[in-house]
Image (spheres, grey):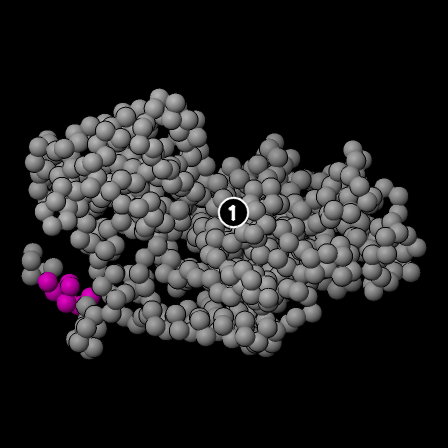
């Protein structure tokens, strides 16, 4: 057995023989793999681990023997918000009651490491730790050899406990992912712990793979140098040439996130650097991230028929030229629908209501003269929908948007034309079919289940403006800097909630949803979407007619054209994703296991900035991922 392990190490460390020294990434990858085998779950009462239903948990982190920062807490926060809590010197019943009201799970990190033969510092906190363990629902994580259990036997009163050897650099990172179920629990004690009844071979096991993992490059067979150097060069070129002031980039392979970095600043004045947890306006990436997963779930449950006509789920369209259009054709942009309707211009006095009528002036800007029952300068019961501080929309204006869609003429020629019109109707359809408010349904069934808590609409209701990256300085409709409010004008007139646009997120949380699709609809220990529905929505639908689209999803061009494609030439036919007008892009390739999320605000300060396209930032960036795959 020892010979087999030695050979495995030698082959995995082959670069050592070429360079004389192993790379830091290879060392980290080997430590990650050893930590997977060595980290042991010692307690798991009532199957608490791995954590399920992240949407129901309010998690606190308490650390003793070290600062409340570090890779364990940072890694936990990749999956869900985990709040560090400082423990007072005098733990009172009032303090315990307060914490019990704030949180329903406490993860206690203990560093069981002695320095120069001294008693580990954590032992000094014995009297502080015991009442927490005894009275609050808790998981104990021990970074050390476990000798602490002899001094603090009450630790075994915790609902969950795991231990990782302190000499492994990646041990705390792996332990956090075992807690979340991203990495399998497979460790067994190799020797009993003196002073306890724990013996060799003890340890609870369970499978992993329920969430994204955060691993070294080598673990995912990605060349670190190629990926890091190339991404940095391309993204920083875009910043230097004014394509966007900043960006986030995330790369994963086979469910392993190997790269997640932020570049540049929120704006070109360079006053605030982009952080990896900042939120971007996703624009049309919303089309595959909002109502679409809901339709996929309903389709898998037999509650939504792709080949049903629009009138089946929206009877008010019966008798219109759209009543008999199928959802399959509309989701694939193959239904002769107009690309878009500038609804806001139809609110202006002395102007046609619709762009297909006479006296329509597409250059008309907001001059403050509005038709009755459209906009007012102040809010009221009749005008409650916020668009700007000086623009409040009539409470029933959504019906006029539906009317405009209903009355719009169809394109004369059949075939592929990208259209957002259906996506204005989908939130109401989802709400009707589920009997649940649209945003509530998305949070309950997808976003919060996945731990994607930044993914959602109207971000200023949950986040400070400083966490949100601004988009355009609107000079024709809203007449202000757009910051925290949806960039898309149509989505703004839907109160910020549309399946056409409106979602905000950071790269990590968007990646969680894309991983759900790549994992055939399974994540967080549940089959959230039927795998057959994922396959149906992500395949080509009308390729024989020259249409490259799936259902909602974009796909590679049928014949690659480098002057028109925003994805890599190497992307497989099974790959899928979408782009967004604000400068966003995500793409998943099940064949290679690659996932890319690129978020930027290329429309700052104006949509006239087309350098993102002129520099081919997205396809170049995407191609780097394929180049970085290590050959067998």
Q: Is residue 535 visible?
A: no
Q: Is residue 209 left or right of residue 354?
A: left
- Above or below — where is 204 with respect to 212? above
Figure quadrant of residue 518: bottom left
Provide residue 214's location: percent of width, then percent of height. Answer: 35, 54
- Say if residue 83 shows up in the picture: yes
Which percent across, then down, holds residue 521? Answer: 45, 47
Q: Nearer the viewer, residue 103 or 599?
A: 103
Q: Give the residue number, with chain letter if any, for mark 1.
A: 454
Q: Secondary structure at mark 1?
A: loop
Q: Is residue 561 above or below residue 478?
A: below
Residue 470 lies in quadrant: bottom right
Who is closer to the viewer here, 183 or 329? 183
Residue drawn 20% across the image and 77% down it: 19
Side (left or right) of 334 relative to 409: left
Return the x and y of residue 579 as percentages of the image width and height. Answer: 57, 61
Residue extending farthest front? 89
Q: Magenta stretch mostly in which secondary structure?
A: helix
Give the position of the N terminus as an image quadrant.
bottom left
Tell me the magenta residue range.
6-12
- Quick check: 131 above or below 185? above
Q: Give the residue displayed 67% in from the left and 40% down from the top.
A: 428
Asked if residue 108 lies in the magenta stretch, the reply is no
Which quadrant of the rendered structure holds the C terminus?
Answer: bottom left
Furthest residue toward top: 93
Q: Residues within 10 Å of mark 1 (few under 14, many from 20)?
A: many
What residue do we see at 41% from left, 26% from top? Answer: 98
């Amino acid at each position: 057995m020892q010979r087999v392990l030695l050979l495995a190490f030698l082959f995995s460390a082959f670069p050592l023989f070429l360079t004389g020294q192993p790379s830091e990434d290879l060392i980290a990858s080997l430590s990650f793999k050893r930590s997977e085998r060595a980290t042991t779950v010692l307690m798991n009462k009532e199957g608490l681990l791995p954590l399920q239903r992240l949407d129901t948990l309010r998690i606190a982190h308490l650390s003793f023997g070290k600062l409340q920062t570090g890779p364990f807490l940072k890694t936990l926060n990749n999956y869900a918000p985990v709040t560090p809590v400082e423990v007072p010197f005098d733990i009172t019943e009032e303090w315990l009651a307060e914490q019990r009201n704030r949180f329903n799970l406490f993860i206690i990190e203990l560093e069981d490491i002695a320095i120069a033969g001294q008693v580990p510092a954590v032992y000094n906190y014995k009297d502080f730790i015991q009442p927490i363990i005894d009275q609050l629902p808790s998981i104990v994580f021990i970074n050390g050899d476990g000798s602490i259990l002899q001094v603090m036997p009450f630790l075994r009163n915790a609902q969950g406990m795991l231990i990782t050897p302190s000499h492994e650099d990646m041990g705390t990172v792996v332990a956090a992912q075992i807690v979340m179920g991203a990495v399998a629990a497979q460790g067994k004690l190799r020797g009993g712990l003196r002073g306890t009844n724990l013996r060799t071979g003890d340890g609870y096991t369970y499978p992993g793979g329920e969430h994204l993992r955060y691993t070294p490059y080598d673990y995912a067979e990605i060349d670190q140098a190629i990926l890091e150097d190339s991404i940095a060069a391309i993204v920083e070129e875009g910043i230097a040439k004014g394509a966007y002031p900043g960006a986030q980039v995330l790369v994963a392979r086979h469910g392993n996130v190997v790269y997640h970095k932020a570049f540049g600043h929120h704006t070109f004045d360079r006053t605030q650097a982009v952080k990896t947890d900042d939120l971007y306006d996703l624009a049309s990436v919303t089309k595959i991230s909002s109502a679409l997963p809901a339709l996929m779930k309903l389709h898998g449950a037999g509650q939504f028929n792709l080949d049903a006509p629009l009138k089946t789920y929206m009877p008010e369209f019966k008798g219109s030229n759209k009543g008999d259009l199928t959802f399959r054709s509309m989701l694939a942009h193959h239904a002769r629908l107009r690309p878009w309707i500038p609804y806001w211009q139809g609110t202006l006095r002395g102007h046609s209501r619709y762009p297909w009528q006479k006296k329509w002036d597409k250059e008309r800007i907001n001059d403050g003269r509005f038709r009755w029952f459209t906009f007012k300068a102040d809010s009221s019961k009749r005008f409650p929908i916020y668009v700007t501080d000086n623009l409040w929309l009539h409470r029933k204006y959504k019906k006029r948007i539906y009317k405009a869609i209903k009355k719009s003429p169809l394109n004369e020629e059949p075939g592929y034309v990208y259209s957002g019109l259906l996506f204005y109707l989908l939130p109401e359809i989802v709400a009707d079919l589920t009997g649940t408010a649209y945003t509530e349904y998305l949070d309950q069934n997808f976003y919060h289940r996945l731990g994607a808590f930044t993914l959602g609409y109207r971000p200023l209701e949950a986040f400070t403006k400083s966490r949100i990256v601004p988009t355009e300085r609107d000079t024709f409709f809203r007449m202000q800097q757009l910051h925290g409010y949806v960039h898309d004008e149509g989505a703004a007139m839907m109160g910020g909630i549309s399946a056409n646009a409106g979602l905000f997120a950071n790269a990590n949380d968007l990646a969680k949803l894309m991983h759900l699709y790549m994992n055939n609809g399974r994540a967080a220990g549940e089959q959230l979407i039927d795998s057959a529905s994922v396959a149906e929505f992500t395949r080509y639908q009308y390729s024989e007619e020259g249409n490259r689209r799936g259902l909602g999803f974009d796909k590679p061009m049928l014949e690659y054209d480098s002057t028109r494609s925003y994805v890599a030439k190497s992307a497989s036919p099974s790959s899928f994703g979408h782009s967004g007008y604000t400068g966003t892009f995500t793409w998943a390739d099940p064949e290679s296991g690659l996932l890319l999320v690129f978020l930027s605000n290329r429309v700052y300060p104006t949509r006239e900035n087309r350098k993102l396209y002129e520099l081919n930032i997205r396809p170049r960036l995407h191609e780097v991922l394929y180049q970085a795959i290590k050959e067998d």
